[in-house]
Image: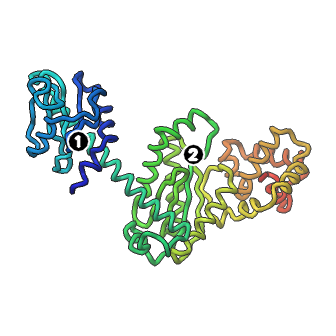
Amino acid sequence: MGEGASIMFLNKNIAEKIILELKDAIEYHINIINNNGFIIASTDLQRVDGYHEGALIVIENDGTEIIVEYDEQYRGCKKGVNLPIYFSNELVGVVGLTGNPNEVVKYARIIKKMTEMVLYEHFDLWNRTSREQVKLLFVNDLISGNLHSSFFNVEERLQKYNLNTKGPYNVALLKVVETGNELINSKINDAKQNIVTNYILDKLSYRNILAVYNGNLFVIITNLDIESVTKEIEYLISKLKEIHGVSLLSTIGNTYDFYGDIPKSYNECISILESLNQREGVYPFYKAALNVAISKIPEAYKKTLKNQVFAECTNEEIKEFVNFIQDYVLLNGSLNLLAKKNHVHKNTVQYKIQKLKDKTDYDLRIYKDMLLLYLASNY
């Protein structure tokens, strides 16, 4: 591992985490000592930062185990057993158990192995986190167009992540839709979020797709055509809904031939995301361009239009009509699809269209009326 291994992988912070995980395993005090002979973590807080001559002897004698028969047999030591800690075949520290040597010796090797296992777990986490951070930095350079001042050789890094340097390229964004249910949101924000994040990154970790999570949303860069990306993400969203009960929103930008145009595709995704307002589903830019255009209309105008169109409606009716109008446009006016989406009979859909006409004097089946209703529903 090199000289820095003991410093990097058995520092005070990690030693304290090891103690925290092992303290309930046995009733004896456990000490973690570094290669300089100082106790860096202990279940006996009074001994932290104290010198431990016995541990230094273990280090200097290439891992020879030391049994301390009585207190202060070696400076700073209490009776017990001291064993070497190895990481990747390198001696990185010492673990000591305080107590009657005849009693603690039977636990000593178990605690040593447990310590080394915890150390490897922390290294594995650190290693995976470091790789993800490098990947995230590279993706940030790509979507921002920061290629000339990038720390990376762009084409080498694209190849490393199994992307074709010749293109084509498009970007997709994926984020969890807020449900309004505090219990579910709480779960997502805690342990459930980690499960969902790892699931998504794992399912997207194959050739021609580079995916990262930036703490807010997933950024996905691909060489796939839009139809293929849409199918992949639709399948992923359906499985997450089925397995974890999580709703997601995805936007997909247009396809470009050169990686220098990745920011264009990314910005298209962002513009759709901002216009959809937490609406579950998958939205390629070419299908959601109307939403983007509407989002650029001044809010004051949309508010005035909404008030005029729904002047004779109650707040409850407005909410019902807004969702219905948006579904109608999204599903191209298909009565069958509307009925299926809302789990109602087709006649119920026709009744809603007529009810909307009666209350607003606008008919969804007439194009110019539909456009006005859709504009009014987007405030």
Report crowding for label 1: few under 14, some 14 to 19, many 20 or more residues within 10 A (C-alpha).
many
Amino acid residing under circle 2 = Ser
Residue 334 visible in image: yes
Question: Toward which corner of the image does residue 157 lie, by quadrant?
Answer: bottom left
User: Which residue is located at x 36 percent, y 52 percent?
Assistant: 128
User: Which residue is located at x 70 percent, y 56 percent?
Assistant: 275
Checking the image for residue 82, the label placed there is: none
Question: Toward which corner of the image does residue 101 lie, by quadrant?
Answer: top left
Position above or below: 54 against 89 = above
Amino acid residing under circle 1 = Asn
Relative image position of residue 95 (x, y in whole percent): 19, 35
3D distance between C-alphas at marks 1 and 2: 48 Å
**Quadrant for the N terminus in the image:** bottom left
Residue 164 visible in image: no
Relative image position of residue 159 (x, y in whole percent): 39, 71
Pointer 2: what residue?
Answer: 247
Pointer 1: what residue?
Answer: 34
Q: Is residue 8 left or right of residue 172?
A: left
Q: Are marks 1 and 2 in contact (CB under 8 Å)?
A: no
Colour scheme in use: rainbow
Q: Is residue 204 left or right of residue 89?
A: right
User: Which residue is located at x 38 percent, y 57 percent?
Assistant: 131
Identify which residue, 197 or 239, lies in the foreground.
197
Look at the numbered disc 1 and give the secondary structure of its residue. Answer: loop
Position above or below: 214 against 72 = below
